[in-house]
Image: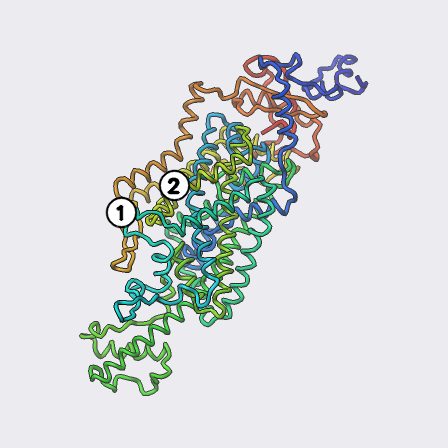
């Protein structure tokens, strides 16, 4: 042994020397712990199993480049909600004033929790099941709950991609098929389809041609074969993108993440050149400051932040688990969070530039229709010609002239004005018609595009963008299922991925029957919101209060090579759990105050009507929430009462190539602390730069460890603290 080793020094000195196992083994040949006298597990050595563990630790798939990883995270977090949910919330909740609570909550809730998920995934290098089994075995149900929620969301999310695929292929014709109402023959007379005439061409095409929707959720109506084929294509695309894991999905991300930005920029440039686009943007960003004091606005902003970043699904953890240990995940979290925010703002500009154009078109149509009514009243002497201002020219009637004429008639004919049936035709009223979700993408936006020059081109681009946005999010959602299952149960990646897609397609047939849209609404509203809120709260508590914020911050310092800001210490420890608890309480209250229901399309009335869910549908709705949350208490009870092993009796450590690797995914907190950390962590050889460990506000010394015998065996051995051996 070299003369400068601590063991040699101790032999020639009377001074007390504190050392760890890493010090003792630093100059020895690689030792297999299971075959040495250090084996305290009682396990017999299994060469095959040990070789598999080493291979898994050493040969875990990795991203080809940092760019590929960032694009994957952006593709996952930037989804359909940025395009059709954020603009609606922005308009509904005060325009530009809504950006203030959204940005505040993004900083104090979104960014810290996003950083937390990136950090634990990168540190432990496992999917959501393995990560939470490691941090707190009794809360291991978090990973299983995340997988279930991902499955529920993936089921209906891919249906939306199927709808986009249908519109995409229908866009290759001129004029667009939803630009005019169809003509039907009634005997020898050709008439406009009644349902279309009473609604609009785009509304009719969506509800009748695309969905062929039934009048209620109780009327199944059988499968819609067109949507069934589109759903099959959608799942085939997801399966092909996922078949080789990140080797295949990572390459897909280059296109699916970047293409939507190309389309959004093109739409923004084209939209700003449209007449009335400025009206839409001005309306959008005119702040209604009184809205900032409304608690409902803050609740909706918090919910949007929560879902925009994909927190709790497990996709963030899955993607980050393929990173190198020294990757700067703090930079990644900040970058992706704010790219997500600016994408939402960009999409809002695009949406309201186009809707401003549409509002002007609809307002002009209103003016023309009502001007014809006034001319009819003038010709029949119902109205006097003296009521018409002299400068008004009916052949070139502007909205301003019509509004002036409207006010005069309303003043003079005050007692009989309603009988005339005249509309105000205010641009503001058109702009205030807020739409979201499918109503925005498949009705309002498609109607606006029918007025574009070269409308088929813009329609193809728009729906190809929706397909890519959906595909990026679906890859992340499916990774939230496949990565933890493959890591935990060691199943074959290709077989499991194909089997998962086939099973999801079969179950997803419920969404492509004629009443399928109502089930999409049910799953979207209730399958994820409450369970995911509980999941993220427990994630936060597991890291900040059970594992320990100080300990976690110390390990982040070792992993990143620099000390994270104290801001994260306080947000993880106090701010985020409190805010998330308030959000969960508000969500529960909202469920109680607003009875669950859905908007049904009534064919005979050619209009939407709000209906309450029947008893059997309520049972499905409640079952979704319970099923998604069930793993949380179930795993806790099983492990609390030792009905299943949590792995805390097994400590498997191997030394290889001068460093330590371990698998202690289920140690109790005290056992873990005493086994893993040495008294002097800084003495451990580490590839990380030298630094001062951050132990939380007010701490100025490394964590003191108990000198009592370690673990339940009292073996007295202390293992070194290295980046590979912690968290």
Is 300 rendered above or below residue 442?
above
Depth check: 187 or 46 in front? 187
In what element is the residue under mark 2?
Answer: loop
Quadrant containing the C terminus in the rendered view: top right
Please give the residue where the numbered disc 2 appears in the rendered image. 527
User: Is residue 393 visible in this depiction of the protein?
Assistant: yes
Q: Is residue 302 visible?
A: no
* Residue 48 quadrant: top right
Q: Is residue 405 above or below residue 235?
A: below
Q: Residue furthest left?
A: 415
Whichever of labels 1 and 2 marks the residue nearer the N terminus, that label is: 2
Left or right relative to 670: residue 65: right
Tell me residue 650's x, y (percent): 55, 18
Q: Residues within 10 Å of mark 2 (few under 14, many from 20)?
A: many
Task: State the separation of the CA atoms marked 1 and 2.
Answer: 17 Å
Q: Residue at x 58, y 36 (%)?
A: 321
Q: Which residue is mark 1?
A: 612
Do callouts 1 and 2 mark residues in contact (Cβ within 8 Å)? no
Front-lying residue, 498 or 464: 498
Q: Residue 657's x, y, as percent? A: 72, 25
Q: Position of residue 224 (x, y in %)?
A: 37, 50
Q: Quadrant of the N terminus?
A: top right
To which quarter of the image does residue 290 belong? bottom left
């Amino acid at each position: 042994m070299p003369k400068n080793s601590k063991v040699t020094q101790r032999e020639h000195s009377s001074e007390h020397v504190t050392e760890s196992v890493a010090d003792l083994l630093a100059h020895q040949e690689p030792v297999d712990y299971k075959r040495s006298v250090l084996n305290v597990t009682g396990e017999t050595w299994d060469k095959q199993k040990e070789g598999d563990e080493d291979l898994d630790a050493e040969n875990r798939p990795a991203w080809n480049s940092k760019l590929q990883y960032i694009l994957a995270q952006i593709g996952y977090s930037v989804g359909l909600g940025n395009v059709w949910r954020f603009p609606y919330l922005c308009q509904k909740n005060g325009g530009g004033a809504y950006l203030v609570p959204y940005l505040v909550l993004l900083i104090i809730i979104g960014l810290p929790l996003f950083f937390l998920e990136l950090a634990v995934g990168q540190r432990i290098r496992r999917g959501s099941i393995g990560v939470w089994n490691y941090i707190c075995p009794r809360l291991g149900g978090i990973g299983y709950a995340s997988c279930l929620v991902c499955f529920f969301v993936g089921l209906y999310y891919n249906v939306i991609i199927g709808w986009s695929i249908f519109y995409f292929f229908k866009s290759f014709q001129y004029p667009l098929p939803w630009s005019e109402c169809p003509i039907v023959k009634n005997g020898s007379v050709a008439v406009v389809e009644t349902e279309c005439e009473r609604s609009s061409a785009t509304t009719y095409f969506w509800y009748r041609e695309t969905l062929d929707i039934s009048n209620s959720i109780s009327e199944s109506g059988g499968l819609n074969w067109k949507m069934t084929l589109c759903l099959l294509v959608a799942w085939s695309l997801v399966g092909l993108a996922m078949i080789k894991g990140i080797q295949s999905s990572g390459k897909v991300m280059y296109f699916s993440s970047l293409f939507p930005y190309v389309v959004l920029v093109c739409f923004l440039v084209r939209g700003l050149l449209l007449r009335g686009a400025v009206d839409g943007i001005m309306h959008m960003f005119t702040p209604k400051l009184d809205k900032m004091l409304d608690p409902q606005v803050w609740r909706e902003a918090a919910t949007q932040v929560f879902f925009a970043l994909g927190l709790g699904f497990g996709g963030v953890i899955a993607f980050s688990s393929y990173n190198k240990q020294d990757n700067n995940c703090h930079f990644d979290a900040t970058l992706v969070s704010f790219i997500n925010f600016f994408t939402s703002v960009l999409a809002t500009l695009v949406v309201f530039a186009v809707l401003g154009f549409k509002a002007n078109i609809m307002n002009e149509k209103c003016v023309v229709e009502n001007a014809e009514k006034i001319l009819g009243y003038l010709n029949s002497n119902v109205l006097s010609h003296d009521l018409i201002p002299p400068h008004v020219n009916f052949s070139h009637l502007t909205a301003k002239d019509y509004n002036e004429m409207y006010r005069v008639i309303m003043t003079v004919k005050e007692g009989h004005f309603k009988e005339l049936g005249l509309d105000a035709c205010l641009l503001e009223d058109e702009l205030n018609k807020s739409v979201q979700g499918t109503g925005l993408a498949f009705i309002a936006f498609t109607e606006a595009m029918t007025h574009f020059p070269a409308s088929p081109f813009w329609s193809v681009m728009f729906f190809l963008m929706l397909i890519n946005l959906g595909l990026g999010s679906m890859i992340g959602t499916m990774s939230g299922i496949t990565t933890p299952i493959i890591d935990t149960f060691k199943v074959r990646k290709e077989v499991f991925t194909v089997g998962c897609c086939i099973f999801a397609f079969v179950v997803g047939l419920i969404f492509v029957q004629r009443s399928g849209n109502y089930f999409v609404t049910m799953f979207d509203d209730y399958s994820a919101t409450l369970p995911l809120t509980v999941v993220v709260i427990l994630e936060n508590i597991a890291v900040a209060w059970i594992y320990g914020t100080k300990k976690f911050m110390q390990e982040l310092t070792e992993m990143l090579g620099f000390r994270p800001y104290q801001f994260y210490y306080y947000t993880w420890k106090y701010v985020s759990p409190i805010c998330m608890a308030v959000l969960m309480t508000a969500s529960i209250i909202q469920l109680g105050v607003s009875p669950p229901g859905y908007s049904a399309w009534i064919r005979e009335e050619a209009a939407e009507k709000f209906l309450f869910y029947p008893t059997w549908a309520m049972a499905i709705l409640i079952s979704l929430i319970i099923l998604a949350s069930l793993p949380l208490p179930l795993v806790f009870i099983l492990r609390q009462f030792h009905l299943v092993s949590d792995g805390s009796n097994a400590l498997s450590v191997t030394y290889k190539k001068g460093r330590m690797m371990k698998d202690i995914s289920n140690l109790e907190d005290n056992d873990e602390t005493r086994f893993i950390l040495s008294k002097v962590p800084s003495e451990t050889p580490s590839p990380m730069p030298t630094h001062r460990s951050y132990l939380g506000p007010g701490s100025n010394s490394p964590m003191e460890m108990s000198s009592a015998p370690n673990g339940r065996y009292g073996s007295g051995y202390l293992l070194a603290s290295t980046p590979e051996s912690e968290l």
